[in-house]
Structure formats: structure tokens, C-alpha cells
Image (cartoon, rainbow, N blue to C red):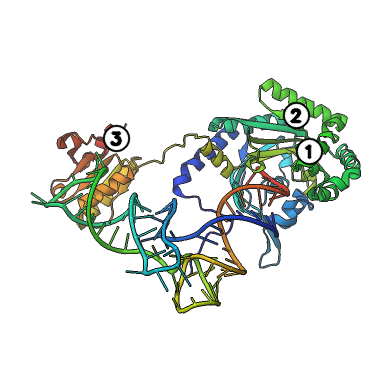
Amino acid sequence: MPHFKSVQGTRDILPKDAMAWRMIERAVSETCERYGYQRIETPLFEETGVFARGVGEGTDIVEKEMYTFKDRSETSLTLQPEGTAGTIRAYIEHGMHTLPQPVKFYYLRTPIFRYERPQKGRYREHHQFGCEALGESDPALDAEMIALLWDIYQRLGARDIVIQLNSIGDRTCRPAYIQALVDYYTPLQDDLCDDCKVRLLKNPLRLLDCKEPRDQPKIAAAPKIADRLCEPCAAHFTAVRELLDAMGLPYTINPLLVRGLDYYTRTVFELAPEQSGRRQSAIGGGGRYDGLVELLGGKPTPGIGFGSGMERAIDLLEQQGVAIPPTPTPQVYIAPLGATARAVASVLAQHLRATDLRVQLGFGERSVKAHMRTANASGARFVALIGADELANDTMTIRDMAASPDAAEDQKQVNVPRSEATIWLKSRLG
RNA sequence: GUGGUCGUAGCUCAAUGGCAGAGCACUAGAUUGUGGCUCUAGUGGUUGCGGGUUCGAGCCCCGUCGAUCACCCCA
């Protein structure tokens, strides 16, 4: 017999984790709706070009991390490696530029696929929630979105998390900054770590990200993008900061914050636990992408968005001991004895469920003891026992599983007419 | 893609190169139809997979798959 395993970097989300997921889903959807964002769900896969062009040909994601395949008509498709590009494609395809702008979306529990070497907090399939807002460049939108992300995690009860903020300029000022960076680093080339030698040629912004100790002094002395922004970008960045200050949102400017997707312009931000030396603990990140809609074939349209990893969010909440709502338990467990009772029990279960009670039906030919054990393990509050005696007089014996072990037997259970089952249970379950 | 550590029952783990085990969980019993505590029994394994060395491999060697940690990068 072959035995199958979930494939590398994927995992099952089991019932024991369901409530944690649901808690996050609720916090996200309710908070987003409060901010006027509406839910969107786009297909799991797109034509490869959507991501290749959107995310950027030179990025690691496109170069070596996409799940790309040809379908039976030889069309190149890709499982979404991030949440933004598909949403932009939908915005363009459905002519949403005709709606009042900005158009504000959120997505939830969206599977994201990246072919990477798995490790803690990093999977080949993971899930994100996120927001996108298109058609508006007002810095108030940037501030609102950062506040929204912050709000979600506050609502979830996460502690000690920080927002890092930076501006990486736009098509006007960034090329000049990158050139300045290259000019600064080129004379130092021979003294750089091997990774940085590659970065200098391939993705100079990433030089700022290096963690090699010997390169830190070079980074500290390197030109900073904040000093090189063009006038409009500088004004935009200032406005975002002033709004965040006015809203009282804690954030820190990180002049070294750059992001790995090519489409970002101006505002970029990340959310991470306060004392996380490790980079893969970032739980959310995003930024403005004013050129992206045009890049994907739409009219020039500003936009901004973020994505946040749900597995990482759950890890964080677990690590911080945030209380997860308990899994709902049955309110009634019905224990039938014998074939006739089982038929009666099935019908009774349906009646009770129709009145919104959570009912667990006991299956099979089992002893009373076995039923009681199963009921106890299920966490059911009451057991409704139906055997020969109860069948004979149309009753059921109801046992209160929450009664003290020391209580007298007649305090623990009572015989109730089956016709009064709903009323009896409802009055006691509040 | 690179490097370190590790793969034994559903879970957590034992077992000098010499008969594969325990606890938990699960199932069933402990005088009539009653849970939790206790006791007893039972189910459950091709020791991740494939080769090799050896009289004999869970243990040693090689490969492979996977997990984990770090790098790279990202959520």
C-alpha cells in the first residue's frame, strides 16, 4: 500500500485549529468592513503574465519561486504567489475605474504558493489576508490602510508589535537614488560580502538589507532614500507621517526598509513583533504601487495594499498566549439503545437541531456505559437516553453531565416526555 | 539553491549490533441501563523509503524522501 503524505511545505489545518482561524477571519472581515473595504475573491491561478509582469521579472518570486505549469491547452498558468496582482487584474477586467474611487477590497484566507525551502513560518502554501485600494493617491488612504492593519492586530489582542515605515520614492526619484547607491557601493565592491556583490549588480536596493556584520558600517554611511525623494514624494511621505502621528499610531521610520516586489512606490510598511531579530517573523507588509495598474494593462491608476500571513499571525497569537475561543461542544448527546430507539433518536435529533440546538447523535449498538463515555468526551452538557423504558412511555432520560459527581442520582437526571424535549432543554441551556 | 540536526505505534518517547517496548489516546470489561477517578485486557509497527556491510541492522555505511533550524528571500 502506498502511503501518501502532504507535499513538502504544505500542511493540513485540522479541526483543533479551526477556532483560531475563525477568530482571525472574523477580526479581519469585521474590521475591514468598518473601514469600507469589500471582499473580493479571485481565482487561485492566473495567466503567468499577470504575476510575471506585475511582481516584476527580476524578483526572486518570479525568477525561482512560482508554481508555473501548462494546462492541457498549453496555456502557461501560475498559482498565485501573492495577493495583489490578481485583484488588479480583476479591477481592470471589470472596468471598476468607473466606480467611485477609491475602490477598496479585502481578501481573506487566500492561499499563496511559493516554491521555497520551508522553515518555521514559511510554507510553500500559506494563507494571507490583505487589502487593496485603487484609484486614489491621497496620503490619507495610506494612513487609513496602515491604521486598518494595526487595528486588526489590536483587535486580535496581539502585543508588542511595531509598524516600520519608509518611502522608496517613485519613477522620478528612485532611479537617481539607486544610481547614487551604486556609485557609493562600487568603490567598496571588493570589500563586500558575496551576496552583496550580486545585489550590487542585480538589485541594489537590497544592499540595505544585508545582515552581514562587516557590511553594516557601509550601510550606515550609505545614502538614504528619504534624503533623495523628489518634491512630490517627500510631501506625500510627510503627510502620511503627520496623519499617523495625529491618529496616535505608533510607528518607526526605517530608512533601510525596502520590499521585495518591484511594484512598490512611495509608502512601504511592515508589521512585525517588537523584538524579532529574525526577518521571517514579519506578519504583514505592503505599500503603494502607483504604476501597477498601468503595468497590467489598465489606465494609470494609483493604488496601495498590504498582505498579512495568517499562519504567522496564528504563531504569534499562540506565542503570546492570546486566548482562542473554545471549540463549540454539543449541548445534547442522544444515546439510543437498540434499533427502534435509534430510529426515534435520529428523528429527535433533527427536531432539536431545527431549534438551533447543537446535537450529537450516538451511533451504533453500544452499551450505556460506552455512550456515556463518548458523551463525556464530547463535552456535551446533557445526555438524552432512549431505551426500552423510554420508548414504552414516550420519554427520554436526561442526565446533566455538569452536575457534581457528589450529587444524588436523582439530582443528576430526570425523566422527561419526548414531546417536551425542546422546551426542557432550551430552558436549561439559556 | 546551500549548510547543520533529526525520522521507532495516532501523539510523546524507550530499546550494548542479538525476541520492537512504555505512557497517553482509542476499543472493551470490572454482576441488571449510566461519564469523570481507579484497575484489567485488547486493537495498533514492513522502525520514512531503497540499497549495502554483517551469522544477525531500529542501531553501522550510501542514497532518497520528509521534518526542523539557519542562510537566501518572503507573509
Question: Which of pointers 2 and 3 lies earlier in the amino acid sequence?
Answer: 2
Same chain check for tags 2 and 3: yes
Element class at badge 2? helix
Q: CA distance from mark 2 to mark 1?
A: 32 Å
Which of the two marks, 2 or 3, is nearer to us in this view?
2
Residue contact at pointers 2 and 1, CB within 8 angstroms: no
Residue shown at 85% from the left, 30% from the top: A227
Same chain check for tags 1 and 3: yes
Q: Quadrant of the C terminus of chain A?
A: top left
Apparent side of residue A297 relative to residue A42 in the rendered image (left or right): right
Which amino acid does the dot numbered 1 rest on?
A: Gln
Q: Residue furthest top?
A: A246
Q: Nearer the viewer, residue A252 or A81?
A: A252
Q: CA distance from mark 2 to mark 3?
A: 53 Å
Provide the chain ID for the residue under circle 2: A
Decide: is A21 above or below B11: above
Position of residue A379 measured from the top left corner of the image (x, y, whole percent): 32, 42
Q: Which residue is mark 3?
A: A426
Residue A216 — which label? Answer: 1
Question: Which of pointers 2 and 1 lies earlier in the amino acid sequence?
Answer: 2
Residue A139 — which label? Answer: 2
Q: Nearer the viewer, residue B9 or A356?
A: B9
Element class at badge 3? helix
Provide the chain ID for the residue under circle 1: A
Residue A274 picture quarter:
top right
Decide: is A221 above or below A212: above
Is residue A51 in sight in this rendering? Answer: no
Could you classify mark 3 by the number of other residues whose Cα lies within 10 Å: few (under 14), some (14-19), or many (20 or more)?
some
Which amino acid does the dot numbered 2 rest on?
A: Pro
Position of residue A81 measured from the top left corner of the image (x, y, whole percent): 67, 51
Apparent side of residue A267 relative to residue A189 in the rendered image (left or right): left
